[in-house]
């Protein structure tokens, strides 16, 4: 089973969409990831199961 899943994230700062790989081996995660376009930090809250993402929330 593949635990890395690629998703598209919309930056809450600039509105641009960029790809991000998520490790789905943990069911709930909170991450801070910089936008690949404007470089501002994004707070991500992710709920997933192995190999699939159930929900993703991106906040500034």
Image (tube, rainbow, N blue to C red):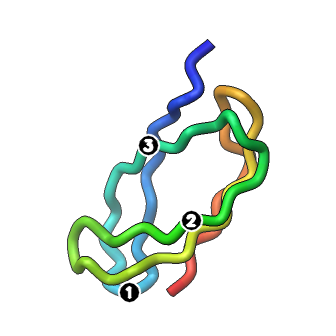
Which residue was labeled with disc 2? 31
Image quadrant holding the N terminus, namely: top right
Which residue was labeled with disc 1? 13
Name the quadrant containing residue 16.
bottom left
Give x and y (percent) for residue 49.
76, 35
Q: For mark 3, does the 10 Å Cα neighbourhood hold few (<14), some (14 to 19), or many (20 or more) residues? A: few
Residue drawn 55% across and 76% down?
43
In the displayed structure, would residue 10 be above or below residue 26?
Answer: below
Residue drawn 69% across and 57% down?
29
Closer to us: mark 2 or mark 3? Answer: 2
Give x and y (percent) for residue 52.
67, 33
Q: Locate residue 33 relative to residue 45 in the image: left or right.
A: left
Q: Kindly identify which numbered label has been placed on residue 21.
A: 3
| Secondary element type, mark 2 | strand
Give x and y (percent) for residue 45.
66, 65
Closer to us: mark 3 or mark 1? Answer: 3
| Secondary element type, mark 3 | strand
Q: Earlier in the sequence, mark 2 or mark 3?
A: 3
Q: In front here: 58 or 22?
A: 22
């Amino acid at each position: 089973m593949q635990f890395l899943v690629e998703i598209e994230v919309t930056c809450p700062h600039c509105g641009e969409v960029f790809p991000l790989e998520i490790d789905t081996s943990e069911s709930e995660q909170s991450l801070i990831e910089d936008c690949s376009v404007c470089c501002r930090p994004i707070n991500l809250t992710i709920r997933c199961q192995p190999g699939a993402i159930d929900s993703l929330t991106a906040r500034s």
